[in-house]
Image (tube, helix red, strand yellow):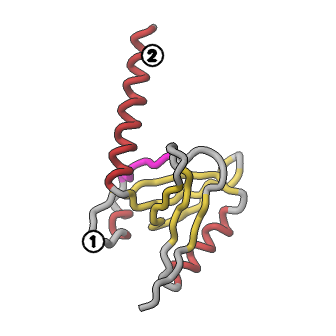
């Protein structure tokens, strides 16, 4: 079985995507792997959403993986596997919705970030 190069969706500039853990059940049917991973949704603006969706569809049509390549907050590049994609329209342009498989360490980081955001909000309320 030949090893195929994944199709990359690369975030070139801007902050890292924010991953929201999926609260829906259907994305879990898309993940098949040896290690358990969480399913999360990332929403990003794009200039041509249909082109991005077409790239994903072509890759999946020939059994190639699709990976989201993005800069992390520590400056290093990270990659996560894209399991599903959809385009929605907003006033600012196309929004690319990507359901991705997050490794356990990324889930722990997002949980820490969420709890620190809640602590900051609590501190702001206490200051009032």
Q: Secondary structure at mark 2?
A: helix
Percent x, y of residue 79? 49, 61
* Residue under numbered circle 2: 124
**Residue found at x 36% / y 63%:** 26
64 to the left or right of 23: right
From what the image shows, is residue 19 above or below residue 117? below
- Residue 9 in which image quadrant: bottom right
Which residue is painted at 43% across and 22% down in the image?
121
Tell me the quarter of the picture where residue 35 sits.
bottom left
Q: Which residue is mark 1?
A: 34
Q: Nearer the viewer, residue 124 or 113?
A: 113
Determine the residue positioned at 38% across, 53% down: 22
Q: Position of residue 65 (x, y in %)?
A: 48, 75
Circles 1 and 2: CB atoms closer than 8 Å: no
Please tell me whether residue 40 belongs to the stretch shown in magenta. no
Q: Between 100 and 67, which is closer to the camera in this rendering?
A: 67
**Tag 1 secondary structure:** loop
Q: Which residues are magenta?
A: 18-23
**Residue 49 disc label:** none
Residue at the (44%, 9%) spot, across then down? 127
- Find residue 10 and report its horizontal and vertical position in percent: 61, 61
Check disc 1: other Cα within 10 Å, few if <14, some if 14-19, many if 20+: few
Quadrant position of the N terminus in the picture: bottom left
Q: Earlier in the sequence, mark 1 or mark 2?
A: 1
Give the left or right position of residue 38, taking residue 62 as reference: left
Mark 1 vs mark 2, CA separation in Å: 43 Å
Outermost top residue = 128
Q: Nearer the viewer, mark 1 or mark 2?
A: 1
13 w.r.t. 80: above or below: above
- 119 over 105 or under it: above or below: above
């Amino acid at each position: 079985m030949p090893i195929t190069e994944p199709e990359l969706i690369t975030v070139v500039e801007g902050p890292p995507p924010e991953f929201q853990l999926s609260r829906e059940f259907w994305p879990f049917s898309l993940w098949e792997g040896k290690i358990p991973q969480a399913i999360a949704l990332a929403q990003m603006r794009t200039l041509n959403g249909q082109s991005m969706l077409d790239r994903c569809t072509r890759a999946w049509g020939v059994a190639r993986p699709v990976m989201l390549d993005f800069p992390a907050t520590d400056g290093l590049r990270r990659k996560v596997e894209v399991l599903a994609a959809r385009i929605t329209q907003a006033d600012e342009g196309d929004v690319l919705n990507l359901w991705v498989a997050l490794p356990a360490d990324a889930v722990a980081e997002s949980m820490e970030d969420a709890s620190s955001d809640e602590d900051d909000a609590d501190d702001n309320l206490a200051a009032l």
